[in-house]
């Protein structure tokens, strides 16, 4: 199907929602959408890539840009491949399954380069090829599936459809560790058999994820004439999420149900049955989240059977991971990036290393074996999440497991703890949340982390980032006025088949008198 030439090229200013336009995709946006043009407008189209000639249905039209849906692929790009997932066109979990993996890596490097140039004003940065663990599928060590009901009342688990709150039911997922597949498919059947009520955060028919217009005259779609769907009220039910976590190196599995209050008949007996059924399963837990929020995990977790943690091996160390522990979902890629960081720093054993935003010490504990002292700071996240003392408690457990003696943990805000250090750090490792250091501190109405670092002047900085735009913004601050020089950026692919890209930026202190800085700091403490 192709539009007549007059319709394709003319009257672009009159294009409206629902119209069809034809264009060639020439770029990828930071959100992973294909970017094309019709007339003077840019159009963003998911499920496309550069080289595609496409027919697009416009879903939103603004003065200078538009958003559209792929209506028909007229000429495919040479880098287009068949997705590994049968629901890739619907599921919102992956954006790039239709793109050849080698091209994905090129595109991710380009996203980093463009962010540094456009946002950070850094045009001459050395950006290395994207680091990959060579496992573009089956790499996820943790999955958290929202639960729902189909139009005929069957328990479903999966990811939300692109741009909606409709659940795409899954029995397996090509990017998760395949050892979790039996649990995903069979646990849903057990929930169905036991009649456990699925939570709904809006009125639905039979618990499906379709919102219901509460009017008796409306015939709700998705049900045939002989079905008797039940309308479930808003904020009713128990089961919210199914979370599965696996130790990639140990094979140990944790199964966690996120619930309202845990009123599930027969749950303890079923938990024991799951332990016996699945050899790798070491624990079944309930996490309580009664709040009306889109935050997945609540504050309290209770172990029903087995143990409340699994063991994992990372960088030659032992780690304990609980259901809600933050740990990179791609174990192999995180380990590869850590190896690059260690190689770049060339630690001699006498340095003082400060790891800000440390979590459970994933990067710090391996580094601590190569330095004289590692001082680890745990921060209050600025995105509305509360401070997690459990993370520090787990970090202390991991220190004891590995018999590490040169690590000190402190709980608090990085902005306040950094100036209080008794010894000037040689190296500071930053691994902030997605909003970056500057935005995080601003949200807490605190002194900015970056300003503190510019005053302290540690010799080297390593900035681990999960969002190129905020990395570029923070690097602009650090590199301004001759503060730090950006040595290189190492992008890393922690999330193959998606547009997300992580990475590490390495910065060296410019020609500034470190002795003067140390003397000024000492005078301030006297």
Image (tube, helix red, strand yellow):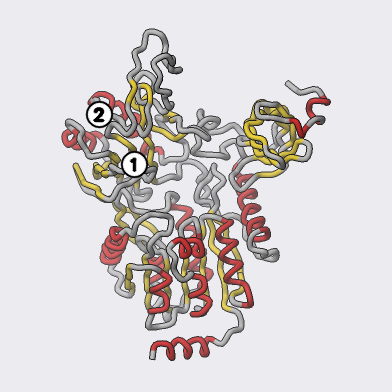
Q: Quadrant of the N terminus?
A: top right
Q: Nearer the viewer, mark 2 or mark 1?
A: 1
Q: Position of residue 155 (x, y in %)?
A: 33, 26
Q: Residue at x 29, y 66 (%)?
A: 399
Residue position for label 2: 196
Could you classify mark 2 by the number of other residues whose Cα lies within 10 Å: few (under 14), some (14-19), or many (20 or more)? some
Residue position for label 1: 292
Judging depth in this view, the residue of 464 and 307 nearest the camera is 464
Q: Position of residue 413 (x, y in %)?
A: 38, 68
Q: Quadrant of the C terminus?
A: bottom left
Label 2, secondary structure: give it: loop
Judging depth in this view, the residue of 344 and 382 nearest the camera is 382
Could you classify mark 1 by the number of other residues whose Cα lies within 10 Å: few (under 14), some (14-19), or many (20 or more)? few
Residue 75 found in image quarter:
top right
Q: Residue at x 51, y 71 (%)?
A: 450
Q: Position of residue 34 (x, y in %)?
A: 66, 40
Q: Residue at x 43, y 17 (%)?
A: 220
């Amino acid at each position: 199907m192709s539009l007549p030439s007059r319709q394709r090229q003319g009257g672009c200013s009159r294009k409206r929602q629902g119209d069809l336009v034809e264009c060639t995709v020439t770029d990828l946006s930071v959100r992973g959408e294909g970017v094309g043009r019709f007339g003077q407008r840019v159009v963003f189209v998911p499920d496309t890539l550069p080289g595609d000639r496409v027919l697009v249905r416009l879903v939103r039209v603004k003065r200078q840009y538009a958003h559209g849906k792929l209506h028909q692929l007229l000429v495919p790009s040479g880098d287009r491949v068949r997705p590994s997932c049968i629901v890739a066109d619907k599921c919102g979990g992956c954006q790039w399954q239709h793109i050849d993996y080698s091209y994905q890596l090129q595109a991710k490097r380009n996203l980093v380069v463009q962010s540094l140039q456009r946002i950070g004003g850094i045009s001459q940065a050395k950006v290395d090829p994207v680091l990959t663990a060579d496992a573009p599928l089956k790499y996820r060590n943790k999955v958290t599936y929202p639960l729902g009901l189909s139009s005929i009342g069957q328990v479903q688990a999966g990811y939300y459809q692109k741009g909606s709150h409709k659940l795409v039911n899954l029995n397996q997922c090509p990017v998760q560790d395949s050892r979790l597949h039996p649990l995903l498919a069979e646990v849903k059947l057990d929930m169905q058999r036991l009649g456990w009520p699925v939570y709904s955060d809006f009125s639905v028919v039979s618990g499906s994820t379709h919102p219901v217009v509460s009017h008796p005259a409306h015939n709700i779609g998705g049900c045939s004439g002989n079905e008797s769907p039940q309308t479930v009220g808003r904020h009713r039910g128990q089961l919210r999420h199914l979370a599965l976590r696996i130790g990639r190196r140990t094979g140990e599995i944790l199964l966690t149900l996120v619930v309202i209050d845990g009123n599930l008949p027969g749950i303890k007996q079923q938990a024991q049955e799951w332990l016996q059924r699945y050899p790798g399963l070491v624990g079944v837990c309930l996490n309580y989240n009664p709040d009306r929020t889109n935050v997945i995990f609540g504050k309290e977790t209770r172990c029903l059977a087995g143990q409340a943690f699994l063991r994992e091996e990372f960088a030659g160390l032992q780690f304990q991971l609980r259901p809600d522990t933050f740990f990179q979902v791609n174990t192999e890629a995180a380990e590869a990036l850590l190896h690059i960081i260690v190689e770049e720093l060339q630690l001699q054993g006498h340095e003082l290393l400060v790891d800000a935003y440390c979590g459970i010490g994933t990067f710090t504990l391996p580094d601590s074996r190569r330095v004289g002292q590692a001082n680890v700071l745990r921060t209050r996240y600025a995105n509305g999440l509360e401070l997690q003392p459990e993370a520090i408690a787990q970090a202390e457990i991991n220190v004891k497991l590995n018999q590490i003696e040169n690590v000190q943990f402190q709980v608090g805000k990085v902005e306040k703890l950094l100036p209080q250090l008794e010894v000037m750090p040689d190296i500071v490792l930053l691994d902030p949340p997605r909003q970056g250091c500057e935005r995080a501190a601003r949200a807490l109405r605190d002194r900015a982390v970056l300003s503190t670092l510019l005053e302290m002047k540690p010799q080297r900085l390593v900035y681990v980032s999960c969002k190129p735009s905020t990395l570029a913004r923070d690097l602009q601050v650090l590199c301004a006025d001759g503060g730090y020089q950006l040595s290189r950026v190492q992008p890393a692919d922690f999330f193959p088949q998606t547009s997300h890209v992580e990475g590490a930026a390495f910065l060296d202190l410019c020609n500034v008198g470190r002795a003067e800085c140390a003397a000024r700091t000492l005078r301030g403490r006297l």
